[in-house]
């Protein structure tokens, strides 16, 4: 049996591959907007904000995903409330809640003497433990993600360019922002089983960054990011199987390596183009600038 196909002949690896692929597609779609809108800090904060809910759910014997989702939603709502009603900037509100939720999660974990294994899963995930019900839940999350991303696409694009333009076009940028934060929350919660709360940004950011090196249109970036995310899942599972490494960490590291390889290839390509024609002005695609340059036409 081939070295590349041997691991995927095992049932639990097949489930891990399917679940990881669903997560990669979700993160490819949402991660594109995270990169465009510069929301990486929010995604990281929500990932850590899941810890108290996951810890409490574990102690009470409840589904950990339910606890994590409740905690993440509460954090997202609190960040929005602090920003709207107080005098805190958005990043300051995120920073304060980030520290508060992370500290609370650690306090809950440290208070229990039998939390070692569960704490490791909380932080780094356990993609090899994905079960059929988890796959069903991820499939539902993917459908919701695609539906919301398609429905609010024009509003997202216009708001990324100028909120006033979005308001003028009647696209309700405030609602679009709430939905986008909700999508980030959904992506983080969906990724929890695969890569845990510490490594979630690997799948959320790296494939989108890698895809942004080669595409200029948002749908194309999303599609390529999803494909590269699936590639990272496959590579991570292969490395984990043959090298005996942690699967979630291997997937996250593979995603970052895909981004690094994409950037290096883009740079080499640009040098080659300029070497062939020194007078040719070639601009490599950049996710945020390219999107903003087309925001008005896309929104219309």
Image: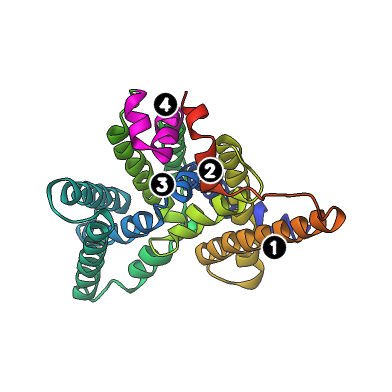
Q: CA distance from mark 1 to mark 4?
A: 35 Å
Q: CA distance from mark 3 to mark 2?
A: 10 Å
Mark 1 or mark 4, earlier in chain: 4
Q: Are marks 3 and 2 in contact (CB under 8 Å)?
A: no
* Residue of label 1: 264
* 71 left or right of 227 in image: left
Of circles 3 and 1, the one toward us is: 1
Give the percent coordinates (x, y) of residue 35.
47, 50
Q: CA distance from mark 4 to mark 3?
A: 17 Å
Point 45% across, 58% down: residue: 201
Q: Is residue 110 among the parts visible in the rendering?
A: yes
- As drawn, the residue found furthest toward the right would be 276
Q: Where does the magenta region start and end?
A: 149-169
Q: How many marks?
A: 4
| Disc sitting over residue 25 in the figure | 2
* Residue of label 3: 187
């Amino acid at each position: 049996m081939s070295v590349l196909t041997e691991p995927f002949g095992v049932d639990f690896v097949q489930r891990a591959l399917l679940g990881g692929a669903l997560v990669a597609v979700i993160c490819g779609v949402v991660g594109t907007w995270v990169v465009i809108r510069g929301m990486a800090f929010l995604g990281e904060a929500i990932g850590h904000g899941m810890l108290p809910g996951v810890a409490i759910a574990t102690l009470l014997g409840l589904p950990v995903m339910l606890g994590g989702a409740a905690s993440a939603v509460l954090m997202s709502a609190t960040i929005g409330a602090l920003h709207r009603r107080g005098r805190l900037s958005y990043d300051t509100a995120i920073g304060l809640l980030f520290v508060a939720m992370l500290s609370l999660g650690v306090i809950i974990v440290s208070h229990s003497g039998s939390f070692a294994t569960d704490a490791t899963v909380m932080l780094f995930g356990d993609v090899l433990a994905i079960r059929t019900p988890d796959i069903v839940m991820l499939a539902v999350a993917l459908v919701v993600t695609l539906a919301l991303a398609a429905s609010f696409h024009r509003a997202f694009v216009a708001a990324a360019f100028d909120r006033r333009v979005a308001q003028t076009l009647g696209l309700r940028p405030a609602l679009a922002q709430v939905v986008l934060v909700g999508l980030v929350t959904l992506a983080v919660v969906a990724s929890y089983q695969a890569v845990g709360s510490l490594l979630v940004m690997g799948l959320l950011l790296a494939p989108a960054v890698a895809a942004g090196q080669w595409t200029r249109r948002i749908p194309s970036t999303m599609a390529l990011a999803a494909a590269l995310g699936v590639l990272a899942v496959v590579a991570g599972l292969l490395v984990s199987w043959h090298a005996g490494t942690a699967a979630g960490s291997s997937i996250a590291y593979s995603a970052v390596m895909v981004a690094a390889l994409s950037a290096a290839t883009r740079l080499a390509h640009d040098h080659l183009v300029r070497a062939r024609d020194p007078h040719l002005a070639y601009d490599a695609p950049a996710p945020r600038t390219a999107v903003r340059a087309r925001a008005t036409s896309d929104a219309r």
